[in-house]
Amino acid sequence: MQQADQLARLVAFYEHLSVENLAQLGAVYAPHARFKDPFNEVEGHAAILAIFEHMFVQVDAPRFIVLDSMGQGEQAFLTWEFRFRMKRWLTGEQCIRGATHVRFDAQGRVLSHRDYWDVAEELYEKLPLLGSFMRMLKRAGRR
């Protein structure tokens, strides 16, 4: 599979991610793929699928918007926004901005997936009680 095709397939998977199409994960990720984000570090289809299933339980209307993507050889890098509504704690649509580095296997499936985003700024600072504390720490660090 051409590198541009595997990257386009990955972008399409994330931009159209829904409970109904989670079964497509096996076509996009290698069987023993590794996935890491600020909260999880797992390996294999079942474990990665569990992360996405949990996401749909925790938040309403989750969607990824891929802003940019570029690939070179078996690697790719994407920047994105994750938009969602919290089922509790926060009102209104929320947005987390981040980036992902992936490596593809010879069949064009994701072999490793690593998300990078600032949990403090993008999530914790927005929570009612914890947010006040996090913003205070941030201000204190600038002095």
Image: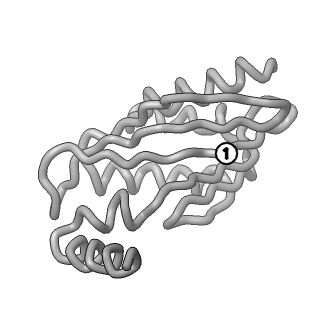
Which residue is at 49% across, 47% downward?
98
Which residue is at 60% across, 45% downward?
100
Instruction: Using residue 44 as the reference point, say whether residue 117 is left or right of it.
Output: left
Instruction: Using residue 78 as the reference point, say whether residue 57 is left or right of it.
Output: left
x, y percent for residue 87: 18, 55
Which residue is at 25% across, 80% downward?
133
x, y percent for residue 13: 53, 29
Q: Classify the position of the C terminus by image quarter.
A: bottom left
x, y percent for residue 74: 82, 35
Numbered marks: total: 1
Instruction: Using residue 72 as the reference point, say whether residue 102 is left or right of it.
Output: left
Which residue is at 49% across, 55% downward?
117
x, y percent for residue 3: 78, 23
Provide the residue designation for mark 1. 101
Q: Quadrant of residue 29?
A: top right
Local crowd at mark 1 within 10 Å, few (<14), some, or many (≥20)? some
- Image height of 77 relative to 71, above or below: below
**Amino acid on which disc 1 is placed:** His
